[in-house]
Amino acid sequence: MPAMRLNFLICRFLVRVPAAGGIAAVLLLAMLVLLNLSARAGIARDWPQKRFSEIHLRAAPVGKADRAQLLGGIEIITRPGWKTYWRAAGEAGLPPQFSWLSVENAQTPEILWPVPTRFVTDGLESYGYDDGVVLPFRLYPVDPAKPVRLHLQARYAVCLEICVPEQADLTLTIVPGALQSDPEIAARLERALQQVPRLQSDGGAVDDSLRIQSVELVETAQAAMLAVTAQSQTGFQTPDLFVDGTDAFLFAAPETELTADGLQARFRVPVTALVPGASLKGHLARFTLADQGRGIEFETVISN
């Protein structure tokens, strides 16, 4: 078994063990360390030897005087060249797990996901982010005159030629009037928010320049495929389509065909059931359409 494939299997186990305890976990972690040794020669020298990433909770005010809304983010910083994963990690990746242990004086925020990049390593496809990521979220204080306190548990992985599971407990207290807007942090949060795909519903989107027109499931005795048609008012350049929403199926890279004017794209997405013979019909699927920094997200129950 190739080292990359074995390493992913080990990481999948460790990420799912709450405290990575027990003799079995220790032995597996030792195997992972041995795999790590072969890749360390190319690691930048300015990182501590046993550190592969950093993770932080960030926040910045929205506007100059608006205390009713804050922009937050989970920032994962990796060693140069390393990657971390999207909410659906694909065949080989390890999807992050974030749990809000407590949120005081605000509604529990929804973590948003910028459009990912597609990776292929040792024939395994995964989705994620090069050189770290900021996952933004909006905060709405219940009482803007009182502090907002956040406590987050994070479990994620960072990968180069090997994959390392990471975990952290993060806290952040935002005191009214004391939150100084660091221009660099505010810019990173805002940039990440701009990279989050807009929601499409009822056949339209906030940004009507991109739109998914139709989704069709094509099933035979040997294979299944999603046929997706999308439209761009300004013309597609390098479109990509990511499918997730159910853990019972894997969705491969689409075959893409553009019309001569570039205004329409047709995607054929191979579907693999993790339980042989299972059908995608009746399952909720989420489609993320991306092109040249723009993106939309569309959810639908597969009906045909």
Image (cartoon, rainbow, N blue to C red):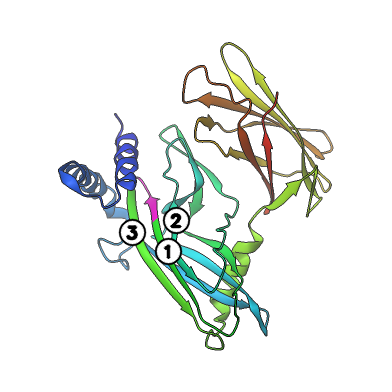
Q: Which one is earlier in the sequence, the residue at label 2 or at label 3?
A: 3
Q: Which quarter of the figure has residue 196?
A: bottom right
Instruction: Pick whichever of labels 2 and 1 is earlier in the sequence.
Output: 2
Rendered location of residue 102, percent (x, y): 44, 66
* Left or right relative to 31: residue 103: right
Q: Amino acid at mark 2?
A: Phe
Q: Residue at 48% of width from left, 68% of height from top? A: 103
Give the residue at mark 3: 52
- Number of numbered markers: 3
> Where's residue 163, x and y in %?
34, 47
| Type of the residue with mark 3 | Phe
Question: Which image quarter is the C terminus in?
Answer: top right
Q: Using the numbered discs, state the Cα–Cα distance from disc 2 to disc 1 in whole angstroms.
A: 7 Å
Residues at circles 2 and 1 in contact by the CB criterion of under 8 Å = yes
Query: Residue under circle 1?
Result: 152
Going 55% across and 69% down the picture, which residue do you hit? 72
